[in-house]
């Protein structure tokens, strides 16, 4: 297993955004589509940040954009359960007051991250599951989607391959975003369909704070992708921020936490990070992780 860690830089003390389109391996055409979807999402976020929007709004809109991209494993195009149903996980967090919201095992809704955001805003509970998440979403004005509006042919084929044991049961393409705004506030968001062929009710790391997502203005903001069963067991997002606190830059902190996951559990994935001062970095132990980033005065660029 090789680790790739990339220091992207950033505008120290200014605003910026970094998004990912999931760790894993995809064939070239799909990877290119995912790269473009990431670039478009980063563009949406940097335009908002440039206009003075909060990091929280920027990561939400970036993730909504990626949830709409059928080539990514979140929202429309999300990975299917072994029964062929869609159960969606998402979380969002801001690093100033540590407000957070999350949903898991949510039936089809176009933007799970917007429902997570509604939980954050309401501030009564942090995480809603299954039928309760659905009821919460409906009560907050979100329209339930028809399964066929959100289940893609690719997701069906991936499931058939996994069930026929022609492929590993790890679908990739989970999405996430981290950002720092003009006021120095950080936020992180992650959204996924999970793993193709998962059992109904299985929940991964993406909606779990400290595992798939975390934001703390004093330490950094993180969004993760990879084998959720492992990411939860090593509290990956918290681990990355502990490495940042120990003095490692964003990319190295991510690489060190992923190395721990590999050594301890022989699992792979990827992590994106923004530091308290707005510097950006990522690392992956998976074969690919399409990412896009931008900061003040810099156009959107993409990396793998
Ligand atoms: N982390 C996600 C999960 O386990 C999957 C992924 O990132 O590809 O649900």
Image (cartoon, helix red, strand yellow):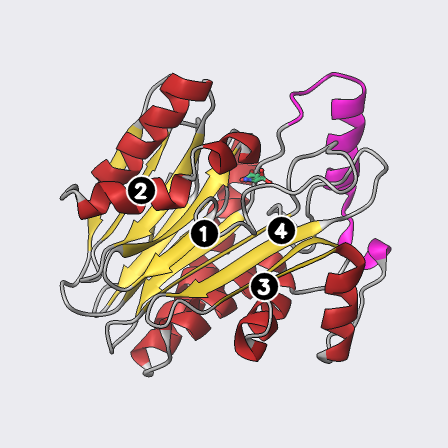
Tags 2 and 1 in contact by the CB under 8 Å rule? no
Residue wearing tag 4: 74
Q: CA distance from mark 3 to mark 4?
A: 10 Å
Residue wearing tag 1: 213
Asked if residue 121 is positioned above or below residue 286 in the image, the reply reads: below
285 displayed left or right of 86: left
Residue 301 lies, in percent from the top left, at 32, 53
Question: Looking at the image, is mark 3 or mark 4 nearer the viewer?
Answer: 3
Asked if residue 175 is positioned above or below residue 225 in the image, the reply reads: below
Disc 2 on helix, strand or loop? helix
Q: CA distance from mark 3 to mark 1?
A: 12 Å
Residue wearing tag 3: 113
N-terminal label among 3 and 4: 4
Residue located 32% across and 71% down the image = 96
Label 4 crowding class (10 Å Cα cut-off): few <14, some 14-19, many 20+? many
Residue located 85% across and 61% down the image = 146
Disc 3 on helix, strand or loop? helix
Q: CA distance from mark 3 to mark 2?
A: 23 Å
- The magenta stretch is 147-169
The quadrant of the rendering that contains the N terminus is top left
- Is 234 in front, or is 193? 234
Label 1 crowding class (10 Å Cα cut-off): few <14, some 14-19, many 20+? many
N-terminal label among 4 and 2: 4
Label 2 crowding class (10 Å Cα cut-off): few <14, some 14-19, many 20+? many
N-terminal label among 3 and 2: 3
Q: CA distance from mark 2 to mark 1?
A: 11 Å
Asked if residue 299 is positioned above or below residue 140 in the image, the reply reads: above
């Amino acid at each position: 297993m090789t680790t790739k860690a990339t220091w992207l830089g950033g505008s120290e003390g200014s605003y910026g955004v970094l998004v990912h389109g999931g760790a894993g391996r995809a064939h070239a055409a799909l990877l290119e589509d995912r790269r473009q979807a990431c670039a478009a999402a980063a563009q949406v976020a940097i335009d908002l940040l440039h206009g003075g929007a909060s990091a929280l709004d920027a990561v939400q809109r970036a993730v909504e954009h990626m949830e709409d991209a059928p080539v990514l494993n979140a929202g429309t195009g999300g990975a299917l359960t072994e029964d062929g149903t869609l159960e969606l996980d998402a979380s969002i967090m801001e690093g100033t007051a540590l407000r957070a919201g999350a949903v898991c095992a949510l039936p089809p809704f176009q933007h799970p991250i917007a429902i997570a955001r509604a939980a954050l805003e309401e501030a009564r509970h942090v995480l809603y599951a299954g039928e309760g998440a659905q009821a919460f979403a409906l009560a907050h004005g979100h329209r339930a989607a028809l399964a066929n509006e959100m289940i893609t042919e690719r997701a069906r084929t991936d499931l058939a391959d996994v069930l026929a044991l022609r492929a590993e049961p790890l679908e990739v393409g989970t999405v996430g975003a981290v950002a720092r705004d003009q006021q120095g506030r950080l936020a992180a968001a992650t959204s996924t369909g999970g793993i193709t062929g998962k059992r109904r009710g299985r929940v991964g790391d993406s909606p779990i704070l400290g595992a798939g997502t975390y934001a703390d203005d004093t330490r950094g903001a993180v969004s993760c992708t990879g084998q959720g069963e492992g990411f939860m067991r090593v509290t990956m997002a918290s681990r990355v921020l502990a490495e940042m606190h120990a003095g490692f830059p964003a990319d190295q902190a991510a690489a060190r936490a992923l190395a721990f996951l590999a050594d301890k559990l022989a699992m792979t994935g990827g992590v994106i990070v923004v530091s308290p001062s707005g510097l950006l970095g990522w690392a992956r132990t998976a074969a690919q992780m399409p990412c896009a980033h931008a900061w003040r005065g810099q156009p959107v660029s993409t990396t793998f």
